[in-house]
Amino acid sequence: MKYSLKTSFARRVLVLFFAILALTVIGRLVTLTGAAAYCAGFPFCAPDQPLGWLKQTHIILVGMASILMFLVLRKAWREQRDQSVLLPLTTILGVMFFGQVLVGAMQVIQSYPAHLVLLHTLTSVALWVSLLLLVYTSGVLAVENKEPATLDRRQRTRDFIALSKPLIVGLLLITTYGGLVIGGKAWPSFSLTMWTLIGGALAAGGSSALNQYIDRELDKNMQRTAKRPLADGRLTNAEGLAFGLALSLISYYVLACFVNGLAALLSLAGIVYYVILYSLWLKKATVQNIVIGGGAGAIPPLVGYAAATGHLDWTALILFAIIFMWTPPHFWALAIVRMRDYERAGVPMLPVVRGEMETRRQIFIYTIELIVVTLLLPILQLAGIVYLVSALVLGAALIYAAWAVWKQGGNKVAWRMYKWSSTYLVFIFLAIMIDAVR
């Protein structure tokens, strides 16, 4: 395909390229000459030597390039909504550009911690690769659209929120906060709580959006998911992919800059686990999809624990194990209710492959194993009496619900187990938090 600058989008991208090139060259000169020492202050400075104007020029170029980057992003989301390469690529570039600005500022504020220095270098390389790709693809794939379609902003806002699966995000944030509290053995500061939960919400929302992008054709065959924004066509595939990638990348920058490197890496691991290991591979490959894939949902408390302590230990690993063992009975109960949906979609969930009776039995077995895992904390003296009593009472109620699923059968009982297991997880983590701070 022939490269061309006929579209205004391609021309604007080329202008952005030269702006970022100038910014990079001046930034490198600032580093080599030590010009930053002659112009103190942020974001603006007052040069006290001629060399200080080099840093001031760099700051001005950052502002100009930021405006150009914003205009390119705006144009992409208005005119290239159907372009499955251009829109995600432009969005990734925009996130990395502003992420690079943030990391550069935080390096100075935090006295150049190793993880931010490495992130700054890696982002620089990735940004240039993305920029060069965008310069080429914009000249090949961009379409001219002088009159973008009029869009219902309220409906689009609701659809983007739906892409992030807010109810699931809320449940994951509870477990993240539980990790924060038990890790610090106190109620965490407002700042740490805010940045950890914002980063966690973005990571969970981005993963959910990418999952819906991957499952968009499969979702059309299931009654429960057929009205999702991508399956129903209310958002384009390119928008779903770009949105998911953007939230995932932003989450990493937020956690790396405002929390710590370990929390950011764990969150990234959770995204990769859920999107690549589970959504792309396990979901349609094996009946053990939920068992193995449960590890993705078990990572948020590790993120919270690492945010509070900067490390992981046995307490954190047991929190991981609790959610890992909780996931199969929770989702198998839903799978019983939605068995026909999964059968039509070709997803090898346990009731589809091995039948409802075996699924009911496995729900009971995994529930027993879950309760045993929850008791490891007091057994190993990692939690106190408040948690022990709560774990026993809540566990007994969950075992009763699982027993009813096994012995009685039917969708009504399975649905009750599905709802109660969500409530159980909330209360068991609430008990962990209360016990940790008492």
Image (spheres, helix red, strand yellow):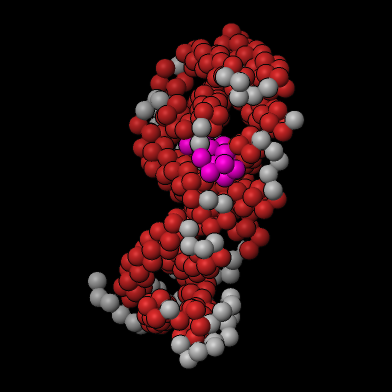
**Which quadrant of the view contains residue 371?**
top right
At which x and y percent is residue 242? 46, 58
**Which quadrant of the view contains residue 25?**
bottom left
Camera-nearest residue between 371 and 230: 371
Q: Residue at x 45, y 81 (%)?
A: 35
At which x and y percent is residue 173? 62, 41
Q: Residue at x 36, y 28 (%)?
A: 286
Q: Is residue 309 magenta?
A: yes
102 relative to 352, above or below: below
The answer, for residue 382, to whether it is visible in the render is yes
Span colored in magenta: 296-311
Camera-nearest residue between 377 and 368: 377
Q: Residue at x 68, y 31 (%)?
A: 436
Q: How many marks?
A: 0
Secondary structure mostly taken by the magenta-highlighted segment of the chain:
helix
Q: Residue at x 60, y 11 (%)?
A: 403
At which x and y percent is residue 27? 42, 77
Specify the farthest residue to the top: 407
Specify the farthest residue to the left: 1
Camera-nearest residue between 200 and 150: 200
Specify the farthest residue to the bottom: 50
At which x and y percent is residue 183? 61, 37
Q: Is residue 8 magenta?
A: no
Name the quarter where the N terminus is drawn: bottom left
Specify the farthest residue to the right: 438
The answer, for residue 163, to whether it is visible in the render is no
95 relative to 366, above or below: below
